Image: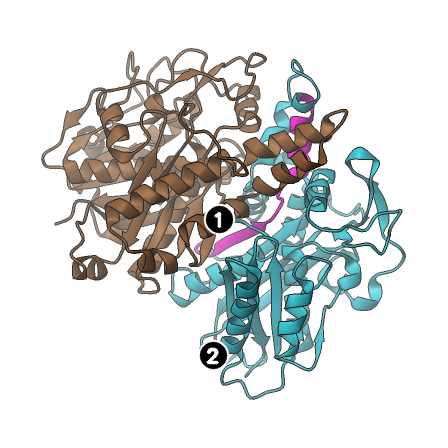
Amino acid sequence: MSAKALRVTGMGAVSPCGWGSAMLRGDAIHGAPEAMEIYGGTRALVRRVPGNDALKHLDQGRFRKVAGITKFAIEAARECLGDKALSPEATVIVAVSAGSITYSEQFFAPMARNKTELPFPQFFPETVFNAACSHLCAFLGHPGPSYALVGDATVGFEALALARDLILNCRTPECLVVVAEEISALQIAGVSRHVRIATADAPHNGMVFAEGSCALRLAPDDPRDAGCSRIWGCSVEPARDIPALGQNLKRQLSALRSGVSVPLELYGGWMGGPFDRLERAVASHFSPKTSTPFSEAGEAFPVSALWRMMEACRSRSTVLLTTMGLHRRSAAALVGVSL
Amino acid sequence: MGLMTPVGATVPETRSGIQKAVDGFSPITLFNASRYRCKKGGQIAELVAEPGRSRASCMIEKVVREAFQQAGWSEEMSAAAPVCLGTTNGGMFEGEQFFRELHAECPREDFSRLSSGIYPISRQLQDLEWNLNLMGRKIIFSNACASGANSIGHAFHMIHDGVWDRAIAGGYDALCELSFAGFDSLRSFTTTQCRPFSKNRNGLLLGEGAGVMCLESESSARKRGATLIAEVLGYGATTDTYHHTQHNPNGKIAARSMSLAMDEGRIAASDIGYINAHGTGTLINDSMEATAVEVVFGADAASVRVSSNKAAIGHLLGAAGSVEAILTALSVSEKWISPTLHVDEVDPICKFRLVQATEEAPHLRYALTNSFGFGGACASLLLGAVP
């Protein structure tokens, strides 16, 4: 394992448990998920972020009409940064999977319904994938580089890998990585064609969707900050077929574990997806202690993966993390204070 | 390099179309555009999706194949190369079919399973893996109109820093009704002609296309005896937080992305012979860019030649930065500058020389290409002729 690590110098989260990382705890998830009607009368089970009357700072100017995903991103970033402003040379990376699909759905609905109706113009800018990233930079007054990344559930790890590239090669002094998702009927309808989902009629049949965000502030390693959690490595690999997917994950985990002498825990992402069994089987080779923190909170794809990473940082243990993407991608990372 | 644009399905065809000042616009037939103010765009007639794939996927694969062929990369070299691509729509055209099926009275499950499976952006990456065996790392930048330039810029940095030996970098976007309706609803479209930097400009036109570069470290390329086309020398990226859909008219943040690219390449403003502008043809964007050029170049602005390809091929959104970077690479390599079509009278805000007909440029060595997108994403690339 390469000794080059990134320090995690701030964390923030928004989740179905509430606004703030402190709200996200395994014992904070109460009650049954709510039913949300998607297309064709299906009532999917979802875990949504609760309403928040305290977001007065987002009730002005360009933030007034932003999508929920943008609010999630801004609030996680705000908590993550605290009172330490981001350097103007820092890089902001916002990773999304479905993005502002709620607005795409609202914008396109009139066109899908009939041949003459025109869409409502205000929705359009919010449909662009970098909308949350753009609004976040505006909120922070950040003039430096910013990137919106798109992908499947592994895109959060890709964002961390990008941050690693930029920081270790001195392209930026620090990175703010934010991952956010917002539930939409369209997204659930799409995923349900390929993955079994939990519904009101069959609550234990499959995946419960969730939404929220997670933010990590990353800086170069510094031996003076001995007590800080670190990301020691992170990779995402594509696979041609399912056997290769398992082999890739094994190789990724072996590379991360190489030379590590402390006992390892493993946080995986088996949440009802098609590669759960494979991921669990590989994971069990690398640690006797495997789990999926916050599985009761539902599946928010790349966001859930970063919630687990945040939990690994909070645990102060040395933790291997895995997640699989629907498009045959395996992601792995190693987090710990020291190795 | 590989290209597909409304004026040509390959690099040679696009080069020829651009040099001959071909206008790549035609009435939209991909979807029913009758309800919109604008009814034309840069639609690529030859681009037809294969069964089970999106138009975007077929387009990017064809362009990557052309780039490999020109670069002379072996299957082994391409298989492990990292891939950085920019896009804003991905397979949105097929996503729209899925959405329509959901709204249909009797939705067909088999249809919607197919259309819901092929539109996500990561599916287009997967198609590249299956069909071209590209198994390297992949990053998708979706930074609006700067996406393609961001992809090339990041790949350049990773190669420059010795992290990667080579990379496939570029962008792609196929037309779809959502973005067409979006720009129409914002009244960003012209209903006549796209005239970047003209006094009477009144809007942009959309197009579709893809552009991909095979980037390689100089040592690696020379070692295998490759023919070098051009060099990427610098990259700057900034974020203008002035407004979600408009850049600050003072052009300072856009100017900073140009300055960062030049600083990295250690090239003075006086050495820049050409700027391939973002030049959308909208009143506000072109004014801002003209101001930004003046901020950077000051008194030297009068000697800089500037043109925009968008009057010929349209705004290619996530592909714009990469297609225009490739056309800029051809400019510095082959010593010619592409024209800005349909200019009637140059806006007096332009202190530079707007190129309106294809020009020879025998002394051109360094050129900038700009991408200034929605959400304030700014990116500039500095390209140079191979010494």
> Which of A222/B374 is in front?
B374
Q: CA distance from mark 2 to mark 1?
A: 28 Å
What amino acid type is highlighted by mark number 1?
Leu
Where is residue A47? Give x, y as percent: 80, 51
Indicate the secondary structure of the residue bearing disc 1: helix
Identify the colour of chain A in the image.
Answer: cyan
Where is residue B86? Give x, y as percent: 44, 43
Q: Which residue is mark 2?
A: A1
Q: Is residue A47 magenta?
A: no
Over which residues does the magenta segment extend? A88-110
What amino acid type is highlighted by mark number 2?
Met
> Which of B85/B275 is in front?
B85
Q: Relative to A201, say whether B298 is above or below.
A: above
Q: Which residue is mark 1?
A: B125
Residue placed at 85% from the left, 56% from the top? Answer: A204
Indicate the secondary structure of the residue bearing disc 2: loop
Q: Is residue A108 magenta?
A: yes
Where is residue B81? Give x, y as percent: 36, 58
Chain corresponding to brown in the figure: B
Residue placed at 80% from the left, 45% from the top? Answer: A53
Where is residue B332? Give x, y as percent: 18, 39
Q: Quadrant of the C terminus of chain A?
A: bottom right
Q: Relative to A151, say whether B95 is above or below.
A: above
Tell me whether marks 2 and 1 sit on the same chain: no
Q: Look at discs 2 and 1 and give the one toward the viewer.
A: 1
Q: Which chain is mark 2 on?
A: A
